Amino acid sequence: MKRILSFTFCLTIGAAAVTVVRAQNWPQFRGPGATGVVEGRPSSATFDGAKSVNTRWKTAIPGLAHSSPVIWGNKIFVTTALTSAAKDETRFGLYGDVAPVKDDPKHTWKVYALNKATGKILWERIAAEGIPKVKRHPKSTHADSTPVTDGKYVVALFGSEGLFAYDMKGKLLWKQDLGVLDSGWFYDPDYQWEHGSSPVIFRDLVIVQADVQKNSFIAAYSLKTGKLVWKTQRDEISSWGTPTVYEGKTRAEVVTNGSKAIRGYDPATGKELWRLTPNSEVTTPTPFAAHDLIFVTSGYRIIQPIYAIKPGAIGDITLKDDKTSNESIAWSRKRGGPYMPTPIVYGDLLYACSNQGVLTAYKAITGEQVYQERLGGKGGAFTASPVASDGKVYLSSEDGEVFVVKAGPKHELLATNTVGEVLMATPAISDGLLIVRGINHLFAFGEPAPAKTAKK
């Protein structure tokens, strides 16, 4: 018995040691599987970037970018685009103007690696330099796509400037020209808004969705070499959502959001598996999976749908005769899909935040509405997607505030936290740290680190 207890004790200590060593990764846009959720570490409900409350560190990142931070181990990776002009032309908030910026001079595109514990910049690399090949919307940037990493490769997409792969120490391994990725207003090709979809890694492939003004496509490139593995043309107008690979019980499928159709593809070959219509004219939210359902939403017009799709579909799964479900769709709604922020499933609820800060909770399995509340009683302008951990949902506003809502069927606002900068990028979470990208700085919010015990 003593030997068994001793063995059990050793296993427990060993497991604890492994837990301490193994860092919590956030490898792509919206983290693992684009779900926006990680668990296992307590996260702070209150912080203040301007007053340095529960602020572990704050690091200036030059340039202009709305790409989100990604994390592997103790490294954070971010991208940016630096203008040669005196300042970037920007405009944030709620408005509907479609014209691009007037002046777009020479830019430098960069990738940064930072130490997660300290915020120290470990390395920075110039990926490209030159005049941007397309213009951008004043609310957009030339570095909107979030990088992706598998712990060995870091892949950054800078739209028309190309796809770049580095090792974890910053060595350029390969680059790939994807052509001019001209995403913009479908009514007039002169209104360019810039590319926004992010790359994803699936096994030994990097998958890119490029819905542009002409010749849209989805393609897979070798993670090791950057060479094209497959490419499938898409009959699509411009879109900005990131593709998601969901590995279900019977197969893996790449799910893409698009105005003309929501589609599923075979990630090994690029063959279309299924499609679903109708959808909004401008699609930005990213598909994701939870409870063995694939959630796809959009919120521009003519409809603002929410679809809960069953994995393994084949062919045209469009609903007939005003039905809300069929053998491939668990449930759906014609209204309620958000325009910019991707919703999140946390626990048993689906949370959807509108551009104006109205948060609606639904039962994820059935689609039944649970509550609807305006965040903080005031709302605001919202582009970033919510993330969640430790029983809390974090929602960042363009006004520089992060609202923290208690997860559950009753709406409870735990805190409204001031960051002090415009917030456009979706945060990341790792080891209890909320990594928030402001317009000028990268912040790490969390409870104070435990004091180190002095050696005797």
Image (cartoon, rainbow, N blue to C red):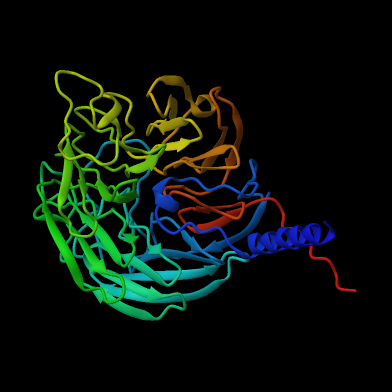
- Identify the residue at horizontal 17%, vertical 40% (top origin): 314
- 345 lies left or right of 216: right
Quick one: 87 or 379, which is closer to the camera? 379
Q: Pinpoint residue 88: horizontal percent, then vertical percent.
A: 35, 58
Work out whether 34 lies above or below 315. Answer: below
**Farthest-out residue, right:** 456
- Identify the residue at horizontal 74%, vertical 61% (top origin): 13
Asked if residue 341 shows in the view, the reply is yes
**Farthest-out residue, front:** 1
Image quadrant occupied by the C terminus: bottom right
Q: How many labels sit on residues?
A: 0
- Identify the residue at horizontal 48%, vertical 30% (top origin): 348
Q: Pinpoint residue 386: horizontal percent, then vertical percent.
A: 46, 41
- Residue 83: image quadrant is bottom left
Quick one: 374 or 173, which is closer to the camera? 173
Asked if residue 99 shows in the view, the reply is no
- 221 lies left or right of 346: left
- 440 lies left or right of 249: right
Image quadrant occupied by the N terminus: bottom right
Q: Pinpoint residue 147: horizontal percent, then vertical percent.
A: 37, 62
Quick one: 312 or 426, which is closer to the camera? 312
Q: Pinpoint residue 404: horizontal percent, then vertical percent.
A: 57, 36
- Identify the residue at horizontal 43%, vertical 78% (top origin): 170
Work out whether 49 lies above or below 414. Answer: below
